[in-house]
């Protein structure tokens, strides 16, 4: 009998991946079956934002692992709903449009700017969709959604109307984070902090009641005119004599009280602090606590207000420079020093923020904090340690969520105002409304009977859209039967950088509307970092384009690298050399498959001790992999499979079983070797299928079935724990002989005269053939 391999190609070619993907699509093997009686598994897939090229390698690795969640769940027997979406709302698309067309939002007619935004991301979106398909994502691309579509925005407006009716929305004029670059209010969750070199200016303040000066160090001298209080720490002996006295503001000659307060830090600057409206959050808190009268200091264009006197209408930086110069000319400037100052900046534009009083809509959250903590503790986190990020954020919340923005390309706030009495009018849900241009859907004002209305021009914070993704993919308000079947969603996969935004706001909003958590599990992946360990970002210029890597190595190698690089939740280093190294594992599996494919596959066999030993180890592998898969931690199965395949199955079992596999003089023992080889390969393919879907499916359909491996369930742990305790001794004995032959210049086929330990007697005949022991 001649042994002929069923896998003809000597090497695996990534070119095959596109053909395999076409077969998946043609056979619809990943289709979510709404009428199926199987238990449903729903993934609240994060809709990525096409913000420019390239879509970096860390993000693509993230989405390849989200696909592993879907494939894992199918092989666990679930009917998987795996929607795909693209996030196209809000500030990033506006900024991209401004750069692309070299214009400014506030200098462009709104209709024209919106039309430009609609199409600005189309090419980037298609590239992103193609990359998703190229990496083997098994989601619903046929009906993928966009967050700027009318049906998505209609749902955002509907949920706002529902919350309005529940009394959870209100409008107020309050100080808010304001980005002068984006020219809009932003929420605390969108604030980042950056250490920026800043001048600390030491200024002399005349004490009214004494013929002396007090020195104050400030990073915001341009806000001198809006100072309403001077504070010192109650325990700071240097300033106890000044308690309840007054200073005269330099350059502005206004009296301000000196007051003891624990917010003053004796170790910073001179220990004396001026409280202005508004330099920072300390100012804001003290203005509220002490009922101080605010002075508007900076307008929405980032210029000084009229209250600044001769510095009015100057940009902040210009006013600061002029005031420092004037202080120096009046001999009120003691010194200047440069310090690294923790500065709040806009998360998107990276512009330093101001705190400006503005009229905005708010969603109540402060009274809801205890419930949010309870919900956060009830969710199942993968990994567990990332739960604390959410809890820390919940504990840090100090204000209700400002949800209105002064931008164009976002979901409009569905409110009209009576032109006579200015009473807000809320429409019925079910349509997509554009109050800035659409006529009011009312005949008259319910309060005064006026027939004319004026539409609100503001839009929602983009997280108002993003936070309803579980409702949208479950057909909330559209298909009640499907909603009840798919909500709460099973799992929310996402990055740790948006725990305080997307995760928090989703739980808040969805629970308000449904009285349920929007999902049961939360899966958090770490950051992709460069060779220096720094997080990849376009602004740093350290992003790696994944497309050339996918072209060179293929999706399976990329996915295996992604899974095996670090444990779930940990940051992972991205480099071409690491991915190149992983390719050896793919080559090993291919070579093993070609070897095993040359032998027939018996239905059963009378196993010998060597077969029982490797199948016992295989059983242990199944157990370990399923533990990893149940926790959606693909680091565990990817490395366990590699360790078993490379270090046990290929290095030891195959070499020990080869003699029997080719021995036609003993059919029983030969078929036992064939049976075991195929059992091991089948199981390895099934266990690795969620991670490397292309190669495993190709080999599976060549050797074992006419249907895809992705329609199979995970293998079960069915083999007895026989001989497993001999593993270390077997490995040690084989390694010893290989080393002896190597050091003595012999080939591995050369005979050797060595005693086999009595404890390895059950494996004696296989070891004799393997090593040619005389």
Image (tube, grey):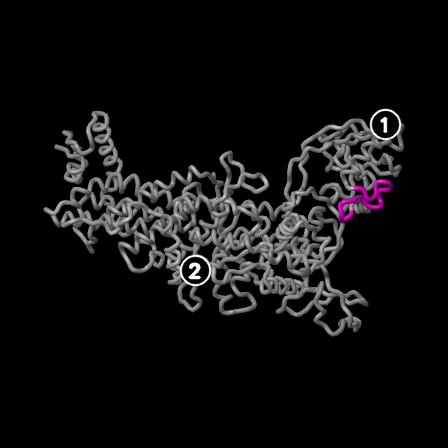
- Determine which residue is flagged by label 1: 331
Q: Are marks 1 and 2 in contact (CB under 8 Å)?
A: no
**Would you name the residue on which mark 2 appears?**
80
Q: Quadrant of the C terminus?
A: top left
Find residue 605 and report its horizontal and vertical position in percent: 18, 52
Q: Between 490 and 432, which is closer to the camera in this rendering?
A: 432
Give the x, y percent position of residue 183.
71, 50
Secondary element at tag 2:
strand
Q: Would you say residue 228 is visible in this rendering?
A: no
Q: Earlier in the sequence, mark 1 or mark 2?
A: 2
Is 310 inside the magenta-drawn segment? yes
Q: Is residue 383 left or right of residue 298?
A: left
- Left or right: where 323 falls relative to 346: right
Assess whether residue 404 is covered by the magenta stretch.
Answer: no
Mark 2 crowd level (few <14, some 14–19, many ≥20, 10 Å Cα): many
The magenta stretch spans which residues? 299-314
| Residue 345, above or below 431 | above
> Between marks 1 and 2, how big is the CA–CA gap?
73 Å
Coordinates of residue 532 in the picture (x, y in percent)? 51, 34
Tell which of 479 and 114 is nearer to you: 114
């Amino acid at each position: 009998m001649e042994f002929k391999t069923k896998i003809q190609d000597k090497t695996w070619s990534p070119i095959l991946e596109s053909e395999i993907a076409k077969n998946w699509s043609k056979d619809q093997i990943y289709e979510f079956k709404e009428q199926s009686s199987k238990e449903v598994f729903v993934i609240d897939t994060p809709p990525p934002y096409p913000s420019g090229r390239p879509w970096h390698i860390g993000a693509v690795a993230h989405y390849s692992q989200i696909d592993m969640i879907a494939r894992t769940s199918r092989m666990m027997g679930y009917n998987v709903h795996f929607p795909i979406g693209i996030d196209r709302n809000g500030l990033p698309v506006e900024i991209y449009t401004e750069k692309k067309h070299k214009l400014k939002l506030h200098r462009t007619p709104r209709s024209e700017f919106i039309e430009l935004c609609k199409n600005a991301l189309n090419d980037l979106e298609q590239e992103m969709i193609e990359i998703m398909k190229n990496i083997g994502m098994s989601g619903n691309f046929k009906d993928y959604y966009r967050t700027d579509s009318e049906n998505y925005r209609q749902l955002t407006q509907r949920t706002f109307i529902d919350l309005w009716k529940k009394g959870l929305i209100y409008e107020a004029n309050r100080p808010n984070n304001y980005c002068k670059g984006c020219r809009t209010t932003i929420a605390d969750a969108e604030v980042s902090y950056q250490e920026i070199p800043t001048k600390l200016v030491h200024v002399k303040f005349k004490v009214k009641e004494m013929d002396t000066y007090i020195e104050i160090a400030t990073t915001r001298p341009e806000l001198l005119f809006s100072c309403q209080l001077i504070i010192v720490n109650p325990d700071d002996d240097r300033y106890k004599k000044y308690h309840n006295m007054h200073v005269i503001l330099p350059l502005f000659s206004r009296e301000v009280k000196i007051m003891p307060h624990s917010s003053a830090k004796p170790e910073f600057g001179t220990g004396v602090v001026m409280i202005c409206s508004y330099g920072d959050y300390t100012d804001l808190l003290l203005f509220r606590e002490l009922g101080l009268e605010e002075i508007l200091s900076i307008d929405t264009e980032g210029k000084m207000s009229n209250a600044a006197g001769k510095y009015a209408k100057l940009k902040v930086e210009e006013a600061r420079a002029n005031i420092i110069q004037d202080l120096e000319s009046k001999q009120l400037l003691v010194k200047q020093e440069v310090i690294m100052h923790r500065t709040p900046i806009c998360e998107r534009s990276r512009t330093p923020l101001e705190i400006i009083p503005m009229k905005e809509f708010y969603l109540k959250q402060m009274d809801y904090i205890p419930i949010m903590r309870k919900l956060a503790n009830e969710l199942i986190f993968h990994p567990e340690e990332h739960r604390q990020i959410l809890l820390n954020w919940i504990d840090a919340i100090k204000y209700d969520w400002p949800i209105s923005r002064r931008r164009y390309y976002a979901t409009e706030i569905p409110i009209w105002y009576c032109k006579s009495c200015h009473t807000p009018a809320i429409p019925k849900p079910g349509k997509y409304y554009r109050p800035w241009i659409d006529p009011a859907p009312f005949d008259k004002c319910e309060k005064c009977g006026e027939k004319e209305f004026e539409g609100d021009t503001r839009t929602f914070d983009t997280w108002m859209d993003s936070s309803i993704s579980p409702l949208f993919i479950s057909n909330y308000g559209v298909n009640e039967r499907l909603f009840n079947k798919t909500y709460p969603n099973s799992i929310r996969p996402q990055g740790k950088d948006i725990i305080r935004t997307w995760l928090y706001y989703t739980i808040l909003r969805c629970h308000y509307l449904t009285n349920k958590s929007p999902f049961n599990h939360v899966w958090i992946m770490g950051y992709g970092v460069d060779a220096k360990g720094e997080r990849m970002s376009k602004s740093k210029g350290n992003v790696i384009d994944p497309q050339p890597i996918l072209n060179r190595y293929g999706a399976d190698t990329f996915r295996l690298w992604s899974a095996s690089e670090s444990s779930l939740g940990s940051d992972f280093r991205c480099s071409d050399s690491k991915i190149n190294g992983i390719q050896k594992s793919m080559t090993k599996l291919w070579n093993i498959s070609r070897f095993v494919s040359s032998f027939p596959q018996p239905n059963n066999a009378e196993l010998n001790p060597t077969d029982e030993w490797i199948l016992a180890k295989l059983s242990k592998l199944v157990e370990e992999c399923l533990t990893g898969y149940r926790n959606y931690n693909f680091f565990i199965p990817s490395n366990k499979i590699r360790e078993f395949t490379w270090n046990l199955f290929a290095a030891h079992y195959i070499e020990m079983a080869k003699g029997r596999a080719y021995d036609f003089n003993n059919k029983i023992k030969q078929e036992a070797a064939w049976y075991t080889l195929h059992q091991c390969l089948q199981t390895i393919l099934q266990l690795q299928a969620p991670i490397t879907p292309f190669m495993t499916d190709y080999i599976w359909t060549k050797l074992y079935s006419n249907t895809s491996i992705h329609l199979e369930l995970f293998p079960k742990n069915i083999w007895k724990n026989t001989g497993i305790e001999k593993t270390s001794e077997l490995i040690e004995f084989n390694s010893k002989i290989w080393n002896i032959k190597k050091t003595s210049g012999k080939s591995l086929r050369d005979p050797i005269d060595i005693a086999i330990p009595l404890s390895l007697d059950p494996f004696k005949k296989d070891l004799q053939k393997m090593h040619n022991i005389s």
